[in-house]
Image (tube, rainbow, N blue to C red):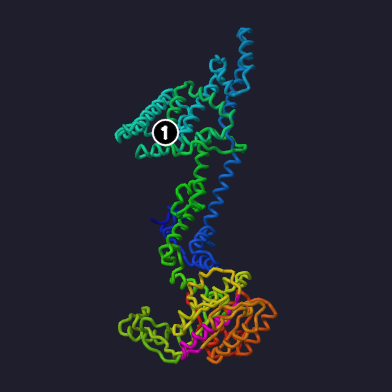
Amino acid sequence: MGPSCMADLSRPDRHSARYGRYRGGPDPLALPVDLAEALDAIGEDVMAGYSPEHAMREFLRRGGEQQRGLEDLARQIAKKRNDLLSRHNLDGTMQEVRELLDRAVLEERKQLARDVDMDDTERTFREMQINNLPTSTAAAVSDLSSYDWNSQQARADYEKIKDLLGRELLDQRFKGMKQALQNATDEDRAAVNEMLSDLNDLLEKRRRGEDTPEDFADFMAKHGDAFPESPQSLDELMDALAKRAAAAQRLRNSMTAEQRAELDALAAQAFGSPELLQGLSRLDDNLQQLRPGEDWFSGAQFDGEQGLGLGDGTGALQDLAELDELSDQLSQSYGGARLEDIDLDKLARQLGDQAAVDARTLQELERALRESGYLNRGSDGNLKLSPKAMRQLGKALLKDVANKMSGRQGQRDLRAAGAAGDLSGASRPWVFGDTEPWDVTRTITNAVVRTSGSRAPGERIRIQMDDIEVAETEARTQAAVALLVDTSFSMAMAGRWVPMKRTALALHQLITSRFRGDHLQLIGFGRAAQVMNVEELTGLDARYDKGTNLHHALLLANRHFRKHPNAQPVLLIVTDGEPTSHLASSGEVLFAYPPHPMTIAHTVRELDNSRRLGAQTTFFRLGDDPGLARFIEELADRVEGNVVSPELDDLGAAVVGSFLSGRGGRSSSPFGHMSDLYGGRGFWYDS
C-alpha cells in the first residue's frame, strides 16, 4: 500500500515528491463509514411509521449528502442501456461487406475499361456479370465467388470480405479474434479450425461424462493463447464461452428475418470454406446442451444509426445482459435481497471504478448497521431500533434542539457545561463516572508540581489521570416530568406526528444523559391514554383514533407525580385539539364531538389535581384554531401555567426549554430571554 508518487527531479530538493490519487481501489486511509447520517434518516422514517428494515432500505436507495445511493446507480445503468440501444444498429457487418463489395466492383470496372487488349466479347460478358449483380449483398457476394477477377485490387478487396466474415463469426464466440486474425495466413486459419475441432471434442467428452482434468490441461497447453482469460478449469471455460455464444444467439434473435437470411448466406463465404461455419455450429450446439440455463432466446431492439459488427454486437448484447443483471441487483426487489449480491466487478466494468466504490461503501454501511447493534431483530423476526440506536438518535435530536435554543450553530453554552448541579467553587480529584467539568487551573497545577523536579527546560507538560480535578457541584432538586403527547389522528393528518416524536426523544435523551436523577414518563393520549417507553412511542404508527383523552393522560401523569413525592412535578402537554373523550368511573372511554361538558369537567378536575400536587404546567398548542387557543389559555390561567404555540420545527426546543425553566422553579414564560430558555441550568450538548 502507498500513494503513487514520483520525485520531481527538476527541483534542487531531491526529497520533494508529488502525490497522486490512490488507484488501488477504495482509499485505505479513508474513514470508516459514518452511521450518524444513516441513523438519523432511518430514525426519521421509523418515527413516520415505517419499519426499521424499510427505513434502512430507503436510506440505501436514496443515499446521503456525500454518498450516492442505489437509485442513482440504477439510473446510470438504465441510461447506459438506453444509450446502447438508441445509438447502435446491427447492420455494421453488412455495411462493411457492402463497402468492400462496391469497392471491388468499381476497381473491376476500371480495369475492364483500361484493358485494351481484352477481347470485346469477353469484356462485354464480364461487364454484364458485374452490372447485373443481385441487389442482395449476400447474393452478390455468392455470385462473385467463382468470378475470375481481372483487377488484382478488386480480387484483394473481395478476399477481404471472406476474411472479414470469418473473423466476425469467430469474434462472436471468442472476444478479440477479429483483431487477432487480421492479416491472418492460411496456416493461422487452419490453426483456428484445429482449435475448434479440439474444443468440440473436449466438450462432447464432457457431455458423455468422459473428460478428465488432464484433457483440459492438454487442450490449454496446445491452444491456451486463444483464451487470454486463462480459465483454470473446463467449467470456467464453458461458462465464458456459453455467455458469449448465448449473446451471439440473442444478437441473431434481435435481427429482422431479412437480416438473418443475409447473414446466413454470407456466413457460407467465411474464410472461403464451410469448415469454419460447421465448427461454430457444432460449438453452439455443445454449449446449449451443457449450459441450458443461459439466455438463448431473448433479443433486443436496436434503433440507432451507428452500425455494430457481429463481434461488437455480441459484446453489446453481453453488456445489455450485465446491465439487466445489475439493474435487478440494485433494485433489491427480490426476496432475501442483500447489497452483497451486487457484482462489483461488473459494476466497475459498466460504470467505472467510482461506481463500484460507491456500491462497496453502501455494502459496508448495510453491514455496519446490522452488526453495530443499532438494529436488533425482535421475537417476531422483524428489525427494531435498539436502545443504542435510540440513544444515538436522541443525541442527534438533542443537538438540533441545542442549536435552535442557543442560536449559535455548533457551539456550546459553557456557563455550566456538563454540571450535574450548581458549581460550588470547590474541586476534587476525578473518579471514573464523573460528569462534572474539569477544574483546568487545578489540573494543570497538579501536573506542574508533579513534574517540577524531572521536567527538562522547554519540555511540554503532560497531564496524567491522577492530575485531573473536577469542579464540585451542589445537588439539584429532582424533577418528576410527565410529557403528554397527543396521538390522535389529527396529529398525523396535519404533519405533526414526527415532530411530536422527535420532541419526546430529545427530552428523553436530555433527562437520561444530563438529569439522571429526574423521573420522566411519556404518555400518549388518543381515544385513551397509555404510558409508553421511548421505543414504543418512536415506533408508534399513526392510526385513525377518534378522541383526545387528556383526562386519562392527566390521571396517569398525577399517578407518576405521586410515586415521586420528593420531586418537583413538571407537566408538559403537547396537543392540537380540545378534549373529546374521558375515562368514566367504570373504566369505559366516553367520546363526544363537539366536546361534551362532562368531558371538559373531568379534564379540568384532573388538571386541578396536578396543580395541587405542585406541578408546573406548560401547554404546547399546535395549530391556529381560535377555539382551541381560547380553551388552552383558560386552562393555563386556571393552573397558573404557560401556553406556547411554537412552529413545528421549534417544538423540540420549546419543550426542552420549558423543562429546563420548570426545573429551576420559574413560572414565567420560557421564551422571555435566552437565560430563561436555559433556566440557569447547565444545558449543553457534547458531540
* Secondary structure, magenta segment, majority class: helix
The relative height of residue 114 versus residue 549 in the rendered view (above or below) is: above
Residue found 40% across the figure and 28% down from its top: 196
Disc 1 marks which amino acid? Gln
Q: Is 325 in front, or is 5?
A: 325
x and y percent of residue 37 in the render?
A: 50, 66
Q: Is 97 in front, or is 24?
A: 97
The relative height of residue 251 versus residue 346 in the rendered view (above or below) is: above
Task: Tell me where residue 438 sits by quadrant.
Answer: bottom left
Q: Is 414 in front, or is 640?
A: 640
**Image side of residue 426 versus residue 681, left or right:** left
Residue 297 inside the magenta-drawn segment: no
According to the image, label 1 marks what residue?
289
Question: Can residue 398 be seen by looking at this rendering?
Answer: no
x and y percent of residue 474 in the render?
A: 44, 91
Residue found 45% across the figure and 55% down from its top: 338
How packed mark 1 is, by other alpha carbons closer than 10 Å (few <14, some 14-19, many 20 or more), is few
Q: Which residues are magenta?
A: 547-568
x and y percent of residue 529 in the render?
A: 54, 78
**Image side of residue 317 versus residue 471, left or right:** right
The relative height of residue 381 versus residue 456 in the rendered view (above or below) is: above
Task: Tell me where residue 108 sits by quadrant.
Answer: top right
